[in-house]
Image: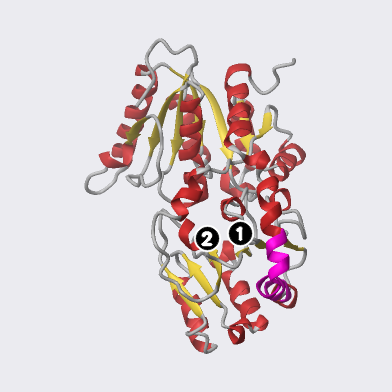
Amino acid sequence: MTLSATSKKPAVCLVAISLGTGGSDRSCAQLSQMLTAEGFEVHIAVLNDNVKFDYSGSLLNLGALKKGKDTLLKRFQRMRVLKRYLKKHNIAHVIDHRAKNQFYREWFYKKFIYHGVKTIYVVHSHLLETYFGKTPDRFRALYQTNAATVTVSEAIKKTLQAKLQLRNLVCIPNAANPAWKALAKQTENPIATPYILSYGRMNDAVKDYRFLLESYAASKLYDEGIQLVLMGEGPSLPQLKQWVQTNGLEDAVQFIPPTTNPFPYVNDAICVTLTSRYEGFPMVLLEALSLEVPVVSLDIPSGPSEIIEHQKNGLLIQKREVSLFAEALRTVALDKELRLRFQRNAAASMARYAPAPIAAAWKKLLLHGPNPSK
């Protein structure tokens, strides 16, 4: 799956926890495809044996090496495998997508595993603790030695500039994928009733599905025959199901398991919602708009305001208030002309997130660095 040794472009290795969970994994898998199409020799190293998304390049599945009880020694041995792999394949750049919250582990990665390789860290979340731990000033020194630090939104870039004064920051958002339209037709959607959709990991501390449930209940859209569908799994799922039962909404709210192909469900939805407390660059909004499905989102840090053009391709709600979000749900669900306008505007709003400009930004970074004019 790799290019020949005569390729003039440098070999790159994308490092991720997995290629099977969430938007950051999906974007990493897609990046491997875009870089391969640009002529780079692409390798991917994953730490967990969870590979579900389509990718391009050669895969080093370190998770498949896990056998029996995992120990510090076994983890060290797997890291030696990664280090040898980088050397064997003459990797010029590592593009690391992992969350980073333990300083000494990241110091070990930088000083031992990635030694002699140009590193690019990708920051996928606006919550600094996810990528800088509880001592961001210590992490700052590690990031300052990167060839570049890529943020997936301008809001994250501005935060890192203001709070940590990081050098070599580049904003490259995630890309939409033309293949999503074909995937939307690949399998049949079993849901027959009209519905509003929200999907992602069921972790209420981050995604705040409780707020969405309360807003849907306040909207009384169930009286209009419109259901709410929540797709995903996670630690908050039992409590959310209990809330639905306690409030007598079992017939109005459906919980369905996650799938690597959510697009048939997205394609048929009245709208897709986002009520997270924070994000980075929420792929659910990109995925919905790429299928010309309207979106209703809270204006949170970060991402929605860079994707949604209020009253053009969706609704961007400024305050986390149940009454406001309920009203927005009713507006989109019941105003067919408004939805058609949003659908007509969706394609144009997604042009800047097409693979070509995103791939070009990555190519420029890898070949010329973050500041080619200097």
Instruction: Tell me the kind of residue under disc 1.
Output: Val
Tag 2–tag 1 contact (CB < 8 Å)? yes
Label 1 crowd (10 A; few <14 / some 14-19 / many >=20)? many
Please tell me which residue is depicted at 37% across the width and 23% down the height of the picture.
Answer: 2
The secondary structure that most of the magenta stretch takes on is: helix
The quadrant where residue 84 appears: top left
Q: Is residue 249 above or below residue 273?
A: below
Judge whether residue 58 is colored magenta.
no
Label 2 crowd (10 A; few <14 / some 14-19 / many >=20)? many
Task: Name the side, left or right, on which 244 lies relative to 172.
Answer: left
Residue that badge 2 annotates: 266
Instruction: Tell me the kind of residue under disc 2.
Output: Val
Residue that badge 1 annotates: 293
Please tell me which residue is depicted at 40% across the width and 41% down the height of the picture.
Answer: 54
Please provide the residue range marked out in magenta: 327-341
Please tell me which residue is depicted at 47% across the width and 55% down the height of the picture.
Answer: 184
Where is the N terminus found, in terms of image quarters? top left
